[in-house]
Amino acid sequence: MTTSEIHGTLPDGREARLFTLRNAKGTVAQVSEYGALLLSLKTADRQGNVADIALGYDSLAGWLTNHSYLGATVGRFGNRIKDGKFELDGQTYSLAKNNEPGGIPCHLHGGLKGFDKVLWRGEIQENSVIFRYQSAAGEEGYPGALDVTVTYTLNDDNELIWEASATTDAPTIINMVHHTYWNLSGDLSQTILDHVMQIDADHFLPTDAGLIPTGETRSVVGTPLDFTQPMVIGDRIDAPFEALTLAGGYDHCWVLRPAAGMKRAACVVHPASGRKMEVFTDQPAMQFYAGNFLDGTIEGKNGIKYQRRSGFCLETENYPDAPNHPHFPSCVLRPGEKYVHRMIHRFSIAK
């Protein structure tokens, strides 16, 4: 069952609606026309207690201040682009430099006003909500006008499906990303350091001091980035390892094992509550971010101030800075082609 109501009014007077999706297992998801955001996801623990496991805000006013991309649909290009520049078909494009890890400016998550900060239009189709947005040529410096669709579906298998698609009228780049911060404990005041993570990847992308990929692909074997077997997130997050030191903890892109179609990217379990989340994707990589830059200044749901590492993100994606590395998978979208990114979050109880 899916219903809608008014989420609130934007500063320019336009109204945004929120949609509530419910399934037969009692799981409830809320999404908004503002930013095509995931506002909340409520699901049961092993005792049957239902709690919200997604960081966020209590009202639209809070979401309008959402500079940490909580619950965001990120675009046009998720993750980082070096120096805010890329070349396409012999022309150089300059984008906003809205992030400075290590004091080195770069372009992050679509710029100053990415897809997470615009008003989409949503409609209900059975157990799905379909959001549509038209991104004008030149928006945030990107070439080509895009017709973009994002669909959220909550099915009775306890799967939340996020699917993005886009077409363009001129060559452009695209790498749309879903960016919810999860805390499977249901207590958003606690850290996620006790969660157990497994990532189905044997390699990661090393980065420089600005958290931009160097172009190398490196094995995880013998490193604190080896999650090929289930590992407690907090056990090695502060290990004296260069990649972790540069990022202040986990904030890296793992290269997923190749597979045709959908493949599992990760599995996370919160042992105390029993909540389990598996992530599946059709993308080649996944960024695991452990909320290192949360610092207690964001006041979220129920007045909770989100402390460092109180949420984690699993962002299935193309490689960061792909436009500037010809040997990375292509992120170019041309007229007549269709971009599609499908991501599934499957919730269950760990045995």
Image (cartoon, rainbow, N blue to C red):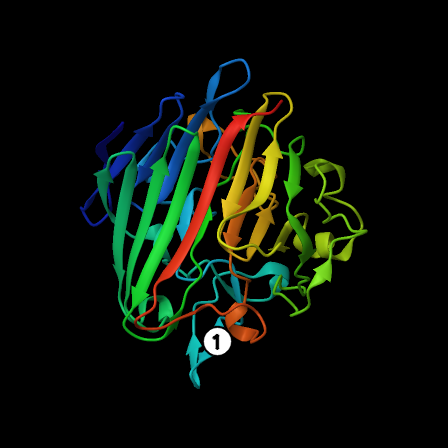
Secondary structure, mark 1, is strand
Rendered image quadrant of residue 9:
top left
Nearer to us in this view, 46 or 56: 46
Instruction: Residue at 59%, 28% (x, y): give it.
Output: 190
Total marks drawn?
1
Quadrant containing the C terminus in the rendered view: top right
Which residue position is annotated with label 1? 86
The disc labelled 1 sits on which kind of residue?
A: Phe
Nearer to us in this view, 101 or 174: 174
The reply, left or right, for residue 253 in relation to residue 163 is right
The reply, left or right, for residue 190 in relation to residue 336 is right
User: Residue 208 at x, y = what percent?
Assistant: 67, 65
Look at the image and tell me whether residue 3 can be seen.
Answer: yes
Most extreme residue toward the bottom, as rendered?
Answer: 90
Nearer to us in this view, 156 or 103: 156
Most extreme residue toward the front, as rendered?
Answer: 260
